[in-house]
Image: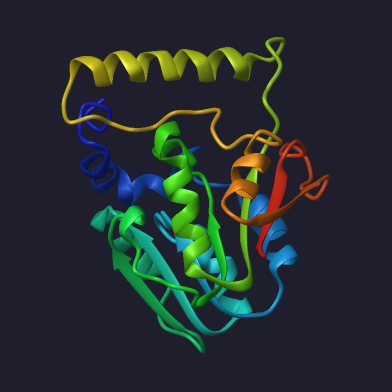
Amino acid sequence: MVQALSSTERGYDLIAPKFDATPFRTPDLILEAMAKEIGPIGSALDVCCGTGAAMIHLRPLCKERLVGIDFSQGMLDEAKKRLPDGPARVEFVRGDVFSMPYREELDVITCVGAFGHILERDEPRFLAKIHDALRPGGRFVFATGPRPSPRHLWFWMAHGFNAVMRVRNALLKPEFIMYYLTFLWPEVRPKLERVGFHVIGREGLVSKPFERAVIVIATKV
């Protein structure tokens, strides 16, 4: 309750020490499937890296550099505990994803479990920053899923949560930005294509209970 009544940044600072024990952490089955699609690379960036769940899977793949960016210092502090320096240089940056300074310098960018923090009106700007940061031929890799059917409980739970958050943010400031049912497949494909990506979605790569997951690979052309 304290988290929900805080700003987005303060809320994640508060939950950071316990975040990996919550259902909000992206499951390893999904992260492993993403890592298999990525393979060995020189450098990678995990956007909204949180406690470093995806970075743990990226580090063995990186030869030179691994960067995690997040606006929550609490989440970054937890990530640092899990990811000491290794063969690849590990960097942690506290910052706004809309102000990332990278320009055609990364081979892979990932983002997991964080798209709900990007408002729909900001999605084109967010994807443009991802595109700018990648080298030509670089890949933006993430997991999503298809839109749930109204026959499924998750459809109503997600819409109910979003409705509560909209009311909360209309009444209370600062806002807590977190909404479900964003960046879904295949609706996200044209959004990626408009900023200059070639997009494929790989289905059937993740075993139960996450078999509906889609691994999206968007390559900068």
Name the foreground residue: 78 vs 44: 44
State the residue lying farthest toward the right. Answer: 204
Q: Quadrant of the C terminus?
A: bottom right
| Horizontal side of residue 217 vs 6, given as left or right | right
| Horizontal side of residue 126 vs 76, given as left or right | right
Colour basis:
rainbow
**Residue 83 in which image quadrant:** bottom left
The residue drawn where x is 35% and y is 63% is 100
The residue drawn where x is 26% and y is 21% is 169
The residue drawn where x is 36% and y is 55% is 97
| Horizontal side of residue 119 vs 155, given as left or right | left
Q: Position of residue 215 (x, y in %)?
A: 71, 50
Position above or below: 168 against 36:
above
Q: Quadrant of the N terminus?
A: top left
**Residue 38 in which image quadrant:** bottom right
Q: Is residue 114 visible?
A: no
Position above or below: 183 against 68:
above
Q: Position of residue 141 (x, y in %)?
A: 63, 57
**Residue 140 in which image quadrant:** bottom right
- How many numbered circles does the render carry? 0
| Horizontal side of residue 109 vs 221, given as left or right | left
Q: Position of residue 186 (x, y in %)?
A: 71, 36
Q: Is residue 150 visible?
A: yes
Q: Position of residue 172 (x, y in %)?
A: 18, 20
Name the foreground residue: 11 vs 196: 196
State the residue lying farthest toward the left. Answer: 173
